[in-house]
Every structure is written in C-alpha cells, then in structure tokens.
Image (cartoon, helix red, strand yellow):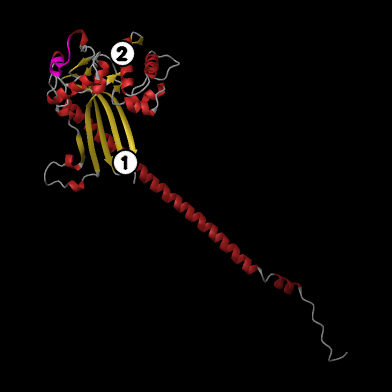
Amino acid sequence: MNPGASRPRPASSPARRHRRAGTGRPASQRGAALLVAMVLLTVVVTLSAGMVWQQWRAVQIEEAERARTQSTWILAGALDWARLILREHRTEHTSLHDAWAQPLAEARLSTFLATDRDNNADDGPEAFLSGQITDAQAKYNLRRLFANGQVAPEELKVLERLFQAGGLPTSQARALADGLVAAWMGDPSAPVAPTRVDDLAWFGLDAASIDTLRPWVVLLPSAEGTAVNLNTAPREVLAAVVEKLDLGAADRIVQVRQRSPFKKLDDVAAQAGLPSGEAGPKLVAERVGVRSAYFEVRGRLRLGDRVIEEVSIVHKRSPTEVVVVQRQRLANVLPR
C-alpha cells in the first residue's frame, strides 16, 4: 500500500446522516410556534374585544332604558300639568287670549325641580322641556263626514272647499271621504280606520297633500260636539265650514277676535260686520261655535342627543274633568 495515497473516507453512519438531515427542524419549529402564538393572541384579542363590546352594549341599553323611563315620567308630568291648566279654564268661551294658549318655551328641567335657592341647578339632568296646548276644534274634524253609514253631502262640500283652499283637486276629497267612511264601516277591502292625520296616506294622499291639510283637519274620537271654534280657527277653515263666507270675511273675523274674542255665536255677525239675511253667511250652531272641548297637548323633551315628543288629545268633559283620549310618542335623534 502506498503510504502517500489518500485514505478512504469512512462511510457515514445512519445517526450522522440523520443529524445532518435534521439540521433545518429547529427553525421550522420556531416558525410554527410563532404562528400558534399569533393565532392564540388573535383569539384572545377577539374574545376580549367581544366582551368589551358586549359590556358597552349593555351599558348603552341600560342608559337608553333609563332615559326612556325618565322621559316617560317627565312627559306624563307635563301632560298632567296641561290638564291642570285646562281645568282652571272656566269661561263660557274659548279663545287664544286664555292662559292655556300660551306656549311653554324650552327651559332646563332643573329649573322646575329646584324648590329653594339652596338647590344647585347645575346638579339637575341635562334635559330641556317645552310644550304647547292648541285647540283641536280650530280644525275641521274629519269624522263629521260620516253620517248614517254614508258620506254626509254638506260635510263633503266642506272638505272640497278645504281642498280648493290648498290647491288640491276636489276629486281627491271625494275619494278620501269614501275611503274614510268605508274604513269606519269596517269594510274588509278598506284600510284600517285612521287615528292620525298622517294615516290619510293609506287613502291615496301623498305627503305634500297631507302637509297642506295638516293645519286644517283633525281626527277626533267622535263627531259629536266638535263644532269649529270661531275664536281659534284659521281663516281657511272658517271659509270652508261657514256657507257663503269668503276668505275676506273670514279674515275680518280673525282680526276682530284678536282684539276681543267672541263670547256668543249671536254676536259674531254684528262684531265682524257680516251681511245678514239670505245673502249673509250661515252661522249654524251645530257646525261653528265659540267654545271648545278637545285640545291637543304637545310635549317636547330634549335629553342629550335625543328629542322625544309626545302628542296627546284631551277631552274636557266637564269643568273639572279632563281626560286623555289619544296619546302618541315620537322620538328623534339630533344631528351631531
């Protein structure tokens, strides 16, 4: 053997080959562990965020429920206050000169709750209350259209004159009257009987037409004793309900009552200088009067970024009894 010849390399053992082949495993294992840690972290963060969101949501629901409960009691108190004011009204005529006709300007609620000077008004809730009482009989009651299961012809003429005053086609007045009577008669093919002016959309009136009629019409629970009040009604309603009364003569009635309200129906023609006899307007006691029994009470509560309004119809059945016959809640969110 040549001693200078290179010595043959010994064959690699299986353990050595296995160690060489496995030299990349520690790096892959570290990558897998990092990936698992990231997944676990994502799961933990997701669960934590979900728990925080659920807790926040629960707090929001609790705050909303507390605000709803508070607003309910506050608006109920405002309604009782309005009923008290109406009970104090004892005159034989109803006019815009009475105490109930003065609106309540928006005021911070804490100013009503303070009982003495030692109370700190700043500790009160950030709530603002306003309200107004209006004469529901200043408007034409649409329930007067219904008589003996059909449309009353004379009342249909009143509705047509209101449509003309608003620039609306009189054909819609006939369609509306027929639809209302069918609903009140319980016709299965007719819409549900309406309770609010907004419900007139069920009978084919668009939003613009309803907004036009809104200051002039109302839906009261009954047609009995709902004559239009000459001391409070706008001139368009006066010209519609009083036969042979034009807008000019109705305007004179409005101007006269601003100086001095009418105390008796018999005094209206003389005070307003209306013509008498067959050529003059017919002031029928069943259709017009100077006293009201139905009133609309509107309360508005601004609490934080929310505005809650409540509209109620009350009936003064006697000098000491004022009952709520209709109540509606409206809720809005103020823009930020």
Which quadrant of the structure image shows residue 228? top left
Would residue 77 be seen by someone viewing this image from the given angle?
no
Q: Where residue 59 sits: x, y (%)?
A: 36, 46
Quadrant assignment, res 71: top left
Residue labelled with disc 1: 306
Q: Give the residue type that dot 1 points to.
A: Arg
On the rendered structure, is 320 left or right of 127?
left
- For label 2, the SS is helix
Query: Circle 1 sits in a helix, a strand or a loop, which is it?
Result: strand
Residue type for callout 2: Glu
Magenta extent: 267-276
Give the image location of residue 254, x and y in percent: 18, 23
In this orientation, which residue lies closer to the viewer: 330 or 115? Answer: 330
Q: Residue 219: give x, y in percent of width and height.
A: 31, 21
**Residue plotted at (31% across, 13% down):** 155
Residue 157, magenta (yes or no): no
Q: Is residue 167 left or right of residue 252?
A: right
309 vs 25: above or below: above
- Assign the magenta stretch its main secondary structure: helix
51 to 260, vertically: above or below: below
Q: Residue at x 36, y 44 (%)?
A: 60
| Label number found at residue 155 | 2
Q: In this rendering, does residue 148 appear at all?
A: yes
Count of labels in the image: 2
